[in-house]
Image: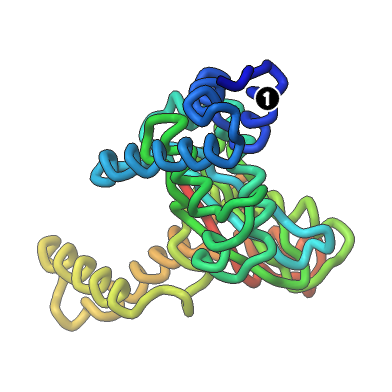
Amino acid sequence: MATITAADVNKLRTLTGAGMMDCKKALVEADGNFDLAIENLRKKGQKVAANRSDRESTEGAAIAVVNADKTSGVVISLNCETDFVGKNEGFVKLATDLANLALNFKTKEEFLAADFNGITVADKLIEQTGVIGEKIEIGSFERLEGAFVGSYIHAGNKIATLVSLSANVAGAEEAARNVAMQAAAMNPIALDEAGVDASIIEKEVEIAKDQLRQEGKPEAMLDNIAKGKIQRFYKDNTLVNQDYIKDGAVSVSGYVKSVDANLTVTGFKRAALG
């Protein structure tokens, strides 16, 4: 029987992120063989993952990160089952480490297959499912590129956003963060009118017309009045047309142009939990 030292346990914990007692038990069962201990931890994770596959993982941590050049960013959510786990410092750190790795990949599939400290991201999630005892998975995975990309993470890591601007000008970093905060708070469905799906507009037009009919408005007037209501819909639900939350006298587009007359918002991504 191999002697399991505290240094051995700590080494396995560093390699896997598993708890101290889980690491000690795995090493004892593997008679001190690190590779076998890691394999045992993964097998435990696979069993737990299979048992919890039908569970909802709507809690967790949403993280947005941007590259050093501020030209691309990624927003991901690391999902779990309970708010208790989602708030755990180690869980948030894992989510942040994964988000930084995700910066290097274009798709969620490539990211899940990527190496994370000697195992794939997908295997790491299975491993952590065994360690934590909850279903752990990547929920959101969104990339954004642009001339300047900024980010915002709401307190508690429940909402994370990215915003891209048309140019890297003086004040771009603050502007991008402010607009990303707007996207977090106001949850727009699209950047502008062009980004709204036609089916949504058709539905909104019909709802508006039904309301107008109930108010007794003449049929001949419905189209024109409905158009006005659709403009209001765009103002409430598209990012650049929304009232700017820090100054309701201007739109988001107007705020950005106050930073630089030629500056525009070119895109945004948002991930939310809970």
The residue drawn where x is 59% and y is 28% is 32
Quadrant for the N terminus in the image: top right
Q: Position of residue 44 (x, y in %)?
A: 39, 36
Quarter of the view holding residue 250: bottom right
Q: Position of residue 174 (x, y in %)?
A: 78, 51
Q: Position of residue 186 (x, y in %)?
A: 49, 49
Q: Position of residue 80 (x, y in %)?
A: 41, 38
* Residue 41 higher or lower than 113, as above or below: above
Answer whether residue 273 is visible to the viewer in this image: no
Q: Secondary structure at mark 1?
A: helix
The residue drawn where x is 56% and y is 55% is 120
Residue 238 horizontal side relative to residue 268, left or right: left
The residue drawn where x is 60% and y is 65% is 143
Quarter of the view holding residue 240: bottom right
Identify which residue, 6 or 212, lies in the foreground: 6
The residue drawn where x is 14% and y is 67% is 210
Residue 223 horizontal side relative to residue 213, left or right: right
Identify which residue, 268 or 196, lies in the foreground: 268
Answer whether residue 109 is visible to the viewer in this image: yes
As shown in the figure, which amino acid type bears the numbered disc 1? Asp
* Residue 35 higher or lower than 108, as above or below: above
* Residue 249 higher or lower than 224, as above or below: above
What residue did someone put label 1 on?
8
